[in-house]
């Protein structure tokens, strides 16, 4: 039996697994998770949520970006068992249960902020994280040092580019992605 066979969606944990509960896109999931399994593989293989992509598998490209407890993370680097009790939002959960797209998804469509679409789920989740981080007053490398600590950070074009710099787009849609984020601010 390989490690994937021991990562079941029901049943009791095997010796090298731990029962882990995650709230993914608003729905609770309790799984027996192999201690070596990363969040990206759990989302894609166990829950069938294939929006987040496996790009580099080293946390360098951002294709796997999702939100954990509202903060953007590279899901290819996080061991799923460490997230017991966490709220995970993937691109599939951005619009909620409704038919309407999330405003950021709508802006990406309106601005044609994608080409092949491979990086788009990670770009969307990262952009949503950027908006939350700036609103919460988290500075970036380019934030004006005169910005009061904890005050919302104005998202200039330079701020948006810096904050999204961890998400790569091989098609070069960066200007339109930044346009879409500016539209939603």
Image: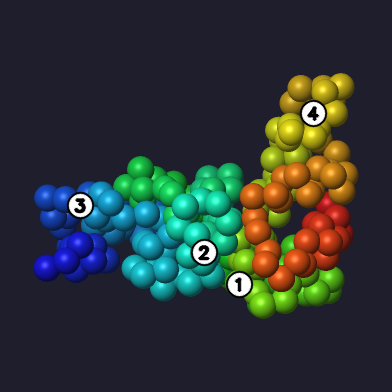
- In front: label 4 or label 1: 1
At numbered mark 1, what does the secondary structure look like: helix, strand or loop? Answer: loop
The location of residue 1, given as percent across then percent down, is: 12, 68
Tag shown at residue 17: 3
Say whether residue 183 is visible. Answer: yes
Q: Earlier in the sequence, mark 4 or mark 1?
A: 1
In the picture of the structure, the residue carrying the numbered disc 4 is 151
- Badge 3 crowding class, 10 Å Cα cut-off, few under 14, some 14 to 19, many 20 or more, is many
In the picture of the structure, the residue carrying the numbered disc 2 is 55
- Badge 1 crowding class, 10 Å Cα cut-off, few under 14, some 14 to 19, many 20 or more, is some
Above-or-below relation of 31 to 85: below
Determine contact: label 2, label 1, CB under 8 Å.
yes
* Residue 174 as seen in the image, left or right of residue 30: right
Q: Nearer the viewer, residue 41 or 174?
A: 174
Above-or-below relation of 42 to 153: below
Q: Earlier in the sequence, mark 2 or mark 1?
A: 2
* Residue 122 as seen in the image, left or right of residue 11: right
Q: Earlier in the sequence, mark 3 or mark 1?
A: 3
Alpha-carbon distance for marks 3 and 1? 31 Å
């Amino acid at each position: 039996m390989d490690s994937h066979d021991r990562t079941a969606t029901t049943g009791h944990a095997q010796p090298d697994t731990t029962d882990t509960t995650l709230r993914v896109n608003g729905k609770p999931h309790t799984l027996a998770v192999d201690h070596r399994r990363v969040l990206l593989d759990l989302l894609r293989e166990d829950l069938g949520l294939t929006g987040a992509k496996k790009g580099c598998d080293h946390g360098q490209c951002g294709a796997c970006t999702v939100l954990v407890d509202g903060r953007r993370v590279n899901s290819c680097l996080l061991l799923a068992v460490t997230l017991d009790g966490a709220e995970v939002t993937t691109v599939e959960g951005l619009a909620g249960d409704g038919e309407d797209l999330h405003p950021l998804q709508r802006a990406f469509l309106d601005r044609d902020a994608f080409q092949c679409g491979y990086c788009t789920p990670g770009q969307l989740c990262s952009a949503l994280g950027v908006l939350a981080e700036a609103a919460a007053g988290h500075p970036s490398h380019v934030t004006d040092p005169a910005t009061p600590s904890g005050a919302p950070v104005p998202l200039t074009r330079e701020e948006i580019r810096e904050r999204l710099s961890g998400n790569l787009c091989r098609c070069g849609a960066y200007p339109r992605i930044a346009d879409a984020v500016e539209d939603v601010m």
